[in-house]
Image (cartoon, rainbow, N blue to C red):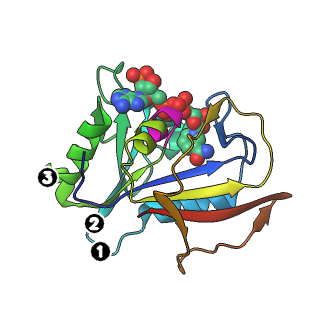
């Protein structure tokens, strides 16, 4: 499933077991990390282009209605159960392969610069197992949280920790919770 455009994945994980969600929501509320997510998934080199975000139906449902679709990005929802695309979404696809095709080819693809896989657990698992992404942007939340959804183990020989001068790799803190941004790149 090779894709002609850069495909990245972005996720925030807890210290214990790489938890990512609880009861359909994020286990924490870190405004700085949400801002980082918005910036990373939105920024493009060319003003004329947008990025695409691909997410599972449950992650779409978890975004408050007033914030959907995620602005300035092509929002692609994965579902096998929905008969039509949810209000506000740009595309509904029945497989990750379909979604990557839609945003890399066709008229939509012409306007898309990078593709971001933004969760949740089911979609991350498929993307990691198939080594689909060039980079994994991983926020390590340096605290334990009760979670029911998890990020899969990934091959750290294939995905190696890199330093990107555009991203602050130091430990940061918000509301007493420490976290840091890491980037893993496929070798
Ligand atoms: N920490 C983070 O960075 C982060 C990021 C995103 C989400 N989350 C959290 O993760 C949790 C949601 O994750 P989740 O695993 O429960 O759900 P999810 O991955 O968001 O959505 C799962 C649903 O997406 C559809 N789907 C997934 N893969 C598909 C495929 N290959 N083809 C077609 N449809 C596909 C199916 O929808 P249908 O059932 O409709 O067929 C499936 O039930 C929430 O708690 C959320 O807050 C955390």
The residue at the point 21 percent across, 45 percent down is: 101
The residue at the point 51 percent across, 36 percent down is: 59
Does any atom of ligand 1 lie closer than 8 Å to the CB of label 3? no
The numbered disc on residue 49 is: 2
Q: Position of residue 160 (x, y in %)?
A: 51, 63
Q: Please name the residue that numbered disc 1 is placed on.
A: 46
The quadrant in which the C terminus is found is bottom left
Residue at disc 2, secondary structure = loop
Q: If you read the primary sequence from the N terminus, does the residue marked by circle 1 or circle 3 appear first? A: 1
Q: Residue furthest left?
A: 106
Residue 120 drawn in magenta: yes
Residue 64 falls in image quadrant? top right
Q: If you read the primary sequence from the N terminus, does the residue marked by circle 3 or circle 2 appear first? A: 2
The residue at the point 58 percent across, 41 percent down is: 151
Residue 19 drawn in magenta: no
**Answer yes or no: do the residues labelled 2 and 1 have beta carbons within 8 Å?**
yes
Q: Position of residue 9 (x, y in %)?
A: 46, 53
Residue at disc 1, secondary structure = loop
The quadrant in which the N terminus is found is top left
Q: Residue furthest right?
A: 176
Dominant SS in magenta: helix
**Answer yes or no: do the residues labelled 1 and 3 have beta carbons within 8 Å?**
no
Q: CA distance from mark 3 to mark 2?
A: 12 Å
**Seen in the image, is 33 located left or right of residue 66?**
right
**Seen in the image, is 146 located left or right of residue 101?**
right
Determine if residue 69 is in view.
Answer: yes
Determine whether 158 is above or below 124 in the image.
below
- Disc 2 crowd rating (10 Å Cα; few below 14, some 14-19, many 20+) is some
Determine if residue 61 is in view.
Answer: no
Start and end of the magenta stretch? 119-124
């Amino acid at each position: 499933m090779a894709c002609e455009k850069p495909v990245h994945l972005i996720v925030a994980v807890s210290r214990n077991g790489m938890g990512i969600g609880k009861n359909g929501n994020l286990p924490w509320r870190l405004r700085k990390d949400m801002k980082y997510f918005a910036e990373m998934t939105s920024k493009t080199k060319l003003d004329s282009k947008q990025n695409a975000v691909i997410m599972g139906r449950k992650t779409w449902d978890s975004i408050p209605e007033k914030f959907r679709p995620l602005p300035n990005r092509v929002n692609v929802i994965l579902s096998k159960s929905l008969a039509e695309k949810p209000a506000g979404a740009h595309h509904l696809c029945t497989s990750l392969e379909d979604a990557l095709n839609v945003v890399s080819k066709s008229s939509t693809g012409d306007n898309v610069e990078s593709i971001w896989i933004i969760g949740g657990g089911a979609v991350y698992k498929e993307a990691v197992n198939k080594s689909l992404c060039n980079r994994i942007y991983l926020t390590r939340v340096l605290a334990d949280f009760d979670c029911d959804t998890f990020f899969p183990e990934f091959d750290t020989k294939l995905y190696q920790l890199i330093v990107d001068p555009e991203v602050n790799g130091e430990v940061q803190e918000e509301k007493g919770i420490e976290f840091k941004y890491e980037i893993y790149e496929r070798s």
